[in-house]
Image (spheres, rainbow, N blue to C red):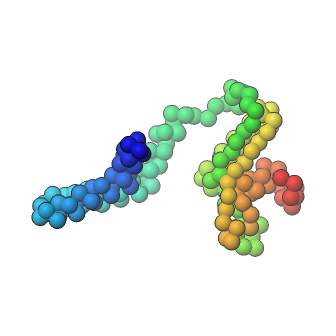
Amino acid sequence: MLSKLVTWLLSPLGMGLCLAGLALLMAWRQRLRSSITLGALAFVWLWAWSTPVLSLWLRGTVEDQYPSLPVATVPQAEALVVLGGGVLPPMGKSADINLQAAADRIWYAARLFHAGKAPLLVVSGGSDLKRYAYSEARAMAILLQGPNRADSDGF
């Protein structure tokens, strides 16, 4: 329980809400200068973490620590698992699958699979079937099977 609380407090949203809560507490205790300072700090903190500049910089910093390995150096595995978040299935009458910023994970998994690094490729991801034609996992399967298999239900 304590570790979850600490993790929440260290998150941008958790820290921003704590600062805003402290600002309200200071206002209630009639410490106006502290209240305004904490409120402004909470606003700037949440705004900064909401901007693409900071979030892209942070993501890039983390990604740079774990560069993609050349396919030849990747060890053998029993299966490759591709997490969702890389594509959006078609909406409405459209048949087009929309590739997102994380679609490179699908491409990399396909490269590993075709290089024989694992005999099984597992895709994951759901979707709101009221909004999308089918699940994200099915969209990835269609992409991985190629354009000639798009009408197939065998995945």
Locate the N terminus and report the quarter of the image it occupies: top left
Q: Nearer the viewer, residue 137 or 71?
A: 137
Decide which of 108, 118 is in the foreground and name it.
118
Up/down of 12 relative to 93, above or below: above
Q: Is residue 97 above or below residue 64?
A: below
Total numbered labels placed on residues in the image:
0
Asked if residue 143 lies left or right of residue 41, the reply is right
Q: Is residue 142 above or below residue 3?
A: below
Quadrant in the picture for residue 128: bottom right
In percent of width and height, residue 111 lies at 75, 39
Picture coordinates of residue 48, whole percent (x, y): 36, 55
| Residue shown at the point (23%, 57%) measured from the top left | 22
Q: Is residue 40 visible?
A: no
Q: Quadrant of residue 98?
A: bottom right
In the displayed structure image, the side of residue 119 where residue 105 appears, left or right: left
Task: Determine the image quadrant of residue 100.
Answer: bottom right
Q: Please say whether residue 119 is visible from this viewpoint.
A: yes
Name the residue located 61 percent from the left edge and 35 percent from the top edge.
68
Q: Position of residue 3 (x, y in %)?
A: 40, 41
- Using the image as rendered, state which of residue 108 and residue 41 is in the foreground: 41
Residue at the location (82% across, 50% down)?
Answer: 145
Q: Residue furthest front?
A: 1
Find the residue positioned furthest to the bottom.
93
* Residue at image point 79% right, 39% down: 120
On the image, the x and y values in percent for residue 30 come to: 11, 64
Is residue 69 shown left or right of residue 2? right
